[in-house]
Image (tube, rainbow, N blue to C red):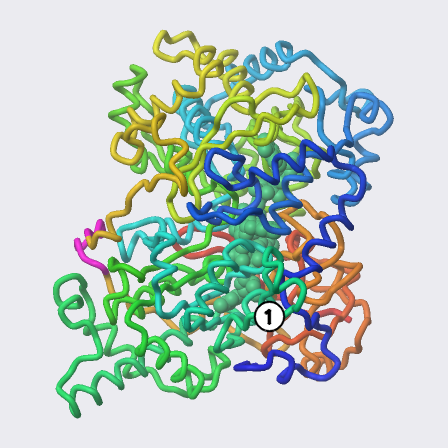
């Protein structure tokens, strides 16, 4: 449960585990194993060589920052997989679709659907033959436009997955508002929306306050629920350097994730020859899922005890009392809560003995500058905002926000998910500068709040949504409540999917359905831009040969549909914008003059240009005008009481997947190979439940709402996990997640603690 030095020593007998460090030779061999011969060699190598460097190609995988001081090869195993996946030589062309009916394709595993290769032609679903048939772009645009013109705009949804560029995203959001709605859910609604709402509430900032320099200057880093080794591997370089500098890293995670335990740098020739790994975390605490609020209260309790003692003995404060007095509110209420919460309650909910929480808190107290880092292990819980509030409480105690080397750093998911929100993809009108839009384009943007992802699902199930346009992504696979959603989906009048590769969402069609092939980012012939997790904005130059001459850039597709839908407006110049994205950047600058000052001139600033952050300057855009201490409502983050037979299920990503895209069946850093149909469970729990290794079981949801949700055929697999908790893979287990099981303020689905029972 607790690990300090040798990661292997505390391992339970018989538990499956990969014992090697992350990075290293194995990370390179895994790429060749997956892709073999099916990539366009020279083109792909050119992209990888330029990947994430100033003036180069910005990776389509994660949102981790692209540093000014880059490596010779500034890409990781998983970034390379994402680039090569886009550069496959396989094609899902009209011949492919002539051979297979949609019903037949539905029987294929998700992995094989994407394996079919890149989409090459605009396609219309023909119900009579149950096949996709090629159409011309003009025919597709006119037909989609005609349908949209007949519908009430508020009965339509425009979804985005967080990859599309700032330019395309700005145009897409503008199209929605000119058409007449704010129904702009984004993959971020399933991801860091908890940050956009929860972090904003307490600091005034919807995004992290750190720059890379802060992480590089910190004395201690605290990780909560973020799997760096698989999901933002380039960050490991920063961590490795930090450890070598003597920085202390403390990790809270129910799973012992390799990347946060030790790391061999695959780009350091000396380390590759004499594999000597760097130990990453000095303390690795296997918190129970949803137990972070309790763990953080425990740490704060110890910090407050030390303050009292230090003041009594030395008349010196441990807390930053000036900062607390000048910059915060509600300190006393929070202090009261921490003091009156007992260690027994804290240990029971967090699953961590008090001496380890005290040790973690000592690391915090002894560091002048601390950064708090988190991911889906925090945001995807019912009480995710409260957990963020607790992490902020800890940081505020010693003034660790708004000073150099300190701050809070949510690690974002998709490569431009943060940027899409910045340029107007939002269901909330108050987050968009309507005055600027009105002035620039001479219209009144719709005042009514639109739907987020969960609300879109509710309305689709209720039959209130008539059309769904998807700019990337795999919505039906990514969301909760799969069975009801798959049943409701075909009742929509129109579904439009703009995509690079075939996926499950393209096979569950509305009455009228189009599948439109776009260029990947690597194939953009013009410069596009994105914002990374540390709020740096970068230009990306792709210029690879498109998968087919019929693929169009995403912006051209959005413009094509918009033109066919909207009445002409001399201020809205779709053709000019498609021709020259620089003009869209001028519009972005005109709409957001502070963040995007001199946008076109600063595109290629090495390391990106910073969009700014008020909380970083200690200007608090909160209700009180100060940073806010908060008192959590309870100690559990799950929102569901424990009871006998009920487990907390964590849905995980493997190292061989990007969200719903499954590259292969190896989760090498967790030692799980050849299958994803597993139920991870601690050996003690397996014994207690009377199960045996390898036994096939079913999971049923235990949400108490009377709805039966079940997934069968999961092999019981011993794995080092805290008590009362199970693990398994996303998206296979999504049918178990109730739509109503979401974060309380932001409605982010609570994918990290799904209440389930095992049926043997
Ligand atoms: N290669 C690759 N890279 C990716 C992605 C991918 O699928 N593949 N996806 C991208 C996207 S969209 C996103 S959002 C990010 C996701 O990246 P992460 O934020 O790392 O998300 P997850 O992989 O879902 O897992 C989060 C971690 O939280 C831990 N955890 C679960 N429950 C709890 C809890 O209650 N408390 C704590 N402290 N920890 C918990 C899990 O064990 C896991 O290690 O990665 C992005 N990058
Ligand atoms: N149980 C569970 N569910 C989860 C999560 C979890 O941790 N657990 N995580 C959630 C999170 S954090 C997220 S972000 C969502 C992800 O949800 P989405 O963003 O909707 O899903 P992706 O799998 O990223 O989408 C993959 C598809 O995008 C298309 N695509 C790829 N590149 C491009 C491109 O350049 N342009 C276009 N137009 N299309 C492209 C391809 O067709 C590919 O099949 O899932 C969420 N669902
Ligand atoms: Mo995400």
Question: Which residue was labeled with disc 1?
Answer: 277
Q: Quadrant of residue 229?
A: bottom right
Q: Is residue 639 visible?
A: no
Q: Is residue 507 above or below residue 629?
A: above
Ligand 1 closer than 8 Å to label 1 CB: no
Place of residue 180 in the rendered image (x, y in percent of width and height, measured from the top left): 40, 23
476 or 314, which is in the foreground?
Answer: 314
Is 371 drawn above or below residue 724 in the view shown?
Answer: above
Q: Quadrant of ligand 2?
A: top right
| Coordinates of residue 200 in the picture (x, y in percent) | 31, 52
Residue at (49%, 46%) from the top-left corner? 63
Q: Residue at x 49, y 28 (%)?
A: 155
Secondary structure that dominates the magenta span: loop
Mark 1: few/some/many CA within 10 Å (<14, 14-19, 20+)? some
Residue 416 visible in the snapshot: yes
Total count of labels: 1
Q: Secondary structure at mark 1?
A: loop
Does 310 appear above or below 81?
below
Quarter of image, res 490: top right
Q: Position of residue 560 (x, y in %)?
A: 54, 15
Residue 650 in the figure: left or right of residue 149: right
- Position of the N terminus by quadrant: bottom right
Which of the two residues, 294 or 366, is positioned nearer the viewer here?
Answer: 366
- Tell me the magenta residue range: 619-627
Q: Residue at x 50, y 28 (%)?
A: 156
Question: Vertically, is 220 above or below 84?
Answer: below
* Front-lying residue, 645 or 234: 234
Q: Position of residue 661 (x, y in %)?
A: 67, 45
């Amino acid at each position: 449960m607790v690990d300090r030095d040798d990661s292997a020593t505390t391992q339970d007998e018989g538990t499956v585990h990969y014992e090697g460090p992350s990075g290293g030779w194995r990370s390179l061999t895994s790429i060749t194993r997956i892709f073999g011969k099916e990539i366009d060699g020279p083109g792909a190598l050119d992209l990888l060589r330029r990947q994430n460097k100033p003036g180069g190609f910005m990776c389509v995988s994660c949102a981790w920052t692209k540093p000014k001081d880059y490596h010779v090869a500034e890409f990781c195993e998983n970034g390379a997989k994402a680039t090569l996946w886009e550069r496959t030589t396989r094609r899902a062309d009209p011949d492919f679709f002539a051979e297979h009916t949609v019903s037949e394709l539905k029987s294929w595993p998700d992995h094989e659907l994407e394996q079919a290769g890149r989409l090459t032609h605009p396609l219309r679903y023909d119900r009579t033959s149950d096949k996709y048939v090629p159409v011309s772009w003009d025919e597709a645009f006119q037909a989609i436009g005609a349908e949209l013109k007949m519908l009430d705009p508020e009965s339509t949804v425009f979804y985005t997955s967080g990859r599309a560029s700032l330019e395309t995203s700005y145009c897409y959001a503008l199209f929605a508002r000119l058409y007449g709605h704010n129904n702009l859910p984004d993959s971020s609604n399933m991801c860091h929306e908890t940050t956009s709402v929860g972090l904003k509430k307490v600091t005034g900032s919807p995004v992290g306050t750190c720059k890379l320099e802060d992480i590089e200057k910190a004395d201690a880093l605290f990780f909560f629920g973020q799997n760096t080794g698989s999901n933002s591997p380039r960050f490991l370089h920063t961590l490795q350097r930090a450890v070598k500098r003597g920085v202390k890293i403390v990790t809270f995670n129910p799973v012992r994730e390799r990347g946060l335990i030790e790391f061999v740098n695959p780009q350091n020739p000396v380390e590759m020859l004499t594999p000597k790994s760097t130990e990453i975390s000095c303390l690795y605490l296997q918190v129970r899922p949803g137990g972070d609020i309790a763990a953080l209260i425990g740490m704060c309790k110890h910090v407050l005890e030390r303050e009292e003692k230090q003041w009594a003995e030395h008349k010196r404060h441990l807390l930053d009392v000036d900062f607390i007095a000048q910059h915060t509110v509600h300190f006393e209420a929070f202090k009261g809560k921490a003091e009156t919460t007992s260690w027994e309650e804290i240990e029971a909910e967090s699953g961590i003995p008090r001496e380890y929480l005290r040790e973690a808190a000592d690391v915090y107290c002894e560091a002048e500058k601390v950064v708090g880092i988190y991911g889906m292990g925090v945001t995807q819980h019912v009480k995710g905002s409260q957990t963020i509030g607790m992490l902020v409480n800890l940081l505020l105690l010693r003034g660790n926000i708004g000073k150099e080397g300190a701050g809070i750093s949510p690690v974002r998911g998709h490569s431009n998910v943060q940027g899409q929100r910045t340029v107007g993809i939002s269901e909330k009108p108050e987050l968009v500068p309507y005055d600027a839009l009105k002035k620039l384009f001479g219209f009144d943007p719709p005042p009514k709040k639109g739907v987020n992802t969960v609300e879109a699902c509710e309305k689709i199930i209720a039959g209130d949504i008539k059309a769904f346009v998807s700019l990337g992504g795999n919505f039906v696979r990514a969301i909760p409540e799969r069975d009801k959603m798959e049943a409701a989906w075909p009742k929509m009048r129109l579904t439009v999917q703009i995509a690079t590769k075939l996926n499950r969402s393209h096979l569950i069609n509305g009455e009228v359905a189009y599948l439109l092939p776009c260029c990947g980012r690597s194939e953009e012939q013009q410069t596009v831009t994105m914002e990374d997790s540390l709020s740096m904005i970068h230009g990306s130059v792709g210029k690879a040969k498109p998968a087919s001459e019929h693929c169009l850039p995403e912006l051209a597709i959005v413009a094509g549909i918009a033109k066919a839908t909207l009445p002409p407006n001399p201020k809205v110049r779709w053709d000019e914008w498609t021709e020259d994205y620089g003009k869209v950047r001028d519009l972005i600058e005109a709409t957001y003059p502070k963040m995007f000052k001199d946008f076109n001139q600063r595109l290629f600033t090495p390391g990106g240009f910073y969009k700014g952050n008020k909380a970083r300057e200690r200007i608090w855009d909160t209700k009180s005008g100060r940073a806010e201490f908060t008192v959590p409502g309870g100690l559990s983050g799950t929102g569901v009481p424990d009871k006998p037979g009920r487990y907390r299920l964590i849905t995980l990503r493997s190292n061989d997947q990007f969200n719903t895209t499954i590259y292969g069946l190896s989760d090498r850093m967790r030692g799980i190979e050849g299958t994803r149909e597993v139920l991870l469970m601690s050996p003690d729990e397996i014994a207690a439940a009377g199960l045996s290794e390898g036994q096939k079981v079913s999971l049923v949801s235990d949400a108490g709402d009377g709805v039966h949700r079940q997934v069968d055929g999961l092999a019981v697999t011993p794995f080092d996990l805290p008590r009362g908790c199970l693990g398994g893979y996303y998206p296979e287990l999504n049918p178990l997640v109730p739509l109503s099981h979401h974060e309380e303020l932001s409605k982010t689905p609570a994918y990290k603690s799904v209440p389930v029972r095992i049926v043997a």
